[in-house]
Amino acid sequence: MLSSFFSKSKPINYIVVALYMLTLFVIAHYKRGFVAESGYIIKFVAGALLYVLPMLMLHFIVQRNDLTHKGTHTILLYAFLTAIVPYALTNTTILLANVFVLLALRNVLYLRNEKQMKSKIFNATIYIGLSSLVYFWSIGFIILVFIGILYFEPKNYRNWIIPVIGLGMVYLFANCFTLLFYDSFYTFTEYVAPVSVSYQGYLIKDQLFSVGILGLCMLFFSSIYLIKLNRKAANIKPVLRLVFAYLIVAVGVAAIAPQKNTSELFFVAIPLAIIGTPYLEMSSYQFAKEINIWVFILIPLTTLLF
């Protein structure tokens, strides 16, 4: 049974999920038009790595912070939720920005250890800054850094200044890079992307389907997550709230993204995968769990193939 298979954490689980993700990635590129040119192939290989490797990083983060049980339901949900937005799979910019945001999340979650907090805050800020250079509105995830400070060490005023300094350094080094290689300054107007609240792009048939599936998952998974959050120990609640804040910020980033083609919804996948895992880990209703896992596996394949 698949429910029994994904309740374990063995190397074969990671291999199966990685192969499934690579299959979806190849199909997505084939549908968009694969070009047998050296430049496209390099971009294709880089995109595949940026898509699959964060799956392993995500599993490490959730296990290290005791966010889930010792299974692989989270990475299965990550594969499902990312494949629901196939436009993102062919967008290397989104995939790279997502990696930086995930690295930032790791540092923010590690603040709970109360060791080397300033360096972790600084590292998280640098990753967010790098992400914003790739996809500007991912700068919104800096909110997670401030929430982490609020939860774990709010009384030290220096912690609140570090994110500002970190973002300033990223912008400064970006200017140094463009000045050195392009003999021009990276102006603030070039850095800041426009805001769009037009959602006409979501009215296209396949994109409307993606938005609908993600919307249903958010409502259902979040309801169960919030119910279970109230039953958790007090020391773990800040981390769980931080993950839920991650989802809210990701939705906000997608809401103001200048281009609406569902690729901006890719940022929702990681927090929603974590939030949805408690549902799959419920011991009761094994038959329903089995059906759900099959649905999660087959929907992306059906969407991409047909």
Image (cartoon, grey):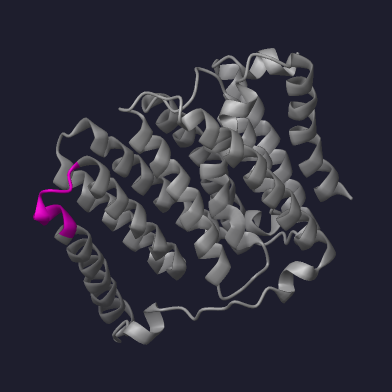
Above or below, 246 against 173 in this view is above
Q: Which residue is drawn at 52% across and 28% down?
A: 228
Q: Which residue is drawn at 50% across and 19% down?
A: 69
Please give left or right for residue 90 compared with residue 213 in the image: left
Please give left or right for residue 34 compared with residue 12 in the image: right
Above or below, 166 against 101 in this view is below
Q: Does the magenta stretch include residue 155?
A: yes
Q: What stretch is highlighted in magenta?
A: 153-160
Q: x, y percentage for residue 258?
A: 56, 76
Please give left or right for residue 15 compared with residue 232 in the image: right
Q: Does the magenta stretch include residue 246?
A: no
Of residues 51 and 181, the one drawn nearer to the viewer in this rendering: 51
Q: In which quarter of the image is residue 86?
A: bottom right
Q: x, y percentage for residue 42?
A: 57, 55
Q: Is residue 5 visible?
A: yes
Q: Quadrant of residue 116?
A: top left
The tally of labels here is 0
Q: Can residue 25 be seen in this view?
A: no
Q: In which quarter of the image is residue 5?
A: top right
Q: x, y percentage for residue 195?
A: 51, 78
Q: Residue at x 17, y 42 (%)?
A: 117
Q: Residue at x 61, y 74 (%)?
A: 259
Q: Which quadrant of the figure contains the N terminus? A: top right
Q: x, y percentage for residue 213?
A: 74, 49
